[in-house]
Amino acid sequence: MEYENDFVNTEAQEVEIDGKKFKIRELAGLEADEAANNYTSLIKDEEDPDKLSIEMDLAKRNHEMLKLCVVDAPYKINGKEFKNAKPESRIEILQKLRPGIRGKLLKEIFRINAMDGDTKKNSKAQSSEKK
């Protein structure tokens, strides 16, 4: 497809964090906008009602990104593979991760979701060079 790098990669990308493999999917533009609606709000300036600022709730942002982007993890939930568990159960387990692992996972989520077409090409080239 011409301009294929302008579109979301539909395959989840595998990342390794502390020796554990996770699969992270990239959000499409509309999904990212809808997620942002859940963790941002507009605040009117008290002195200048025509002036607005955006307030972001980082805990809600991280919750949304973990919920929407992590499609597989090396954990079992009630005897089920992570990818086969209900979304509510998946996010519940991810929120219980140690801060260091959770932080690295979020860093990978934001890296994958911030990529533009050129970055994706370079990232694929670097990962195939490492193999």
Image: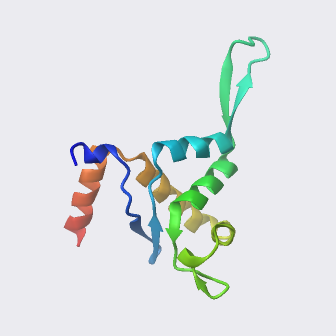
Q: Residue at x 51, y 42 (%)?
A: 30
Left or right of residue 120: residue 45: right
Left or right of residue 87: residue 122: left
Left or right of residue 29: residue 120: left
Instruction: Report which quarter residue 99 is drawn in.
Output: bottom right
Image quadrant containing the C terminus: bottom left
Chosen colour scheme = rainbow
Q: Residue at x 46, y 63 (%)?
A: 24
The image position of residue 111, as x and y in percent, is 43, 52
Q: Residue at x 51, y 67 (%)?
A: 71
Q: Residue furthest front?
A: 1
Q: Residue furthest right?
A: 46
Query: Disc count in the image?
Result: 0
Instruction: Report which quarter residue 12 is drawn in.
Output: bottom left
The image position of residue 82, as x and y in percent, is 57, 77
Above or below for 18 versus 81? above
Instruction: Report which quarter residue 97 is drawn in.
Output: bottom right
The image position of residue 106, as x and y in percent, is 53, 58
Above or below for 122 versus 19? above
The image position of residue 109, as x and y in percent, is 48, 56
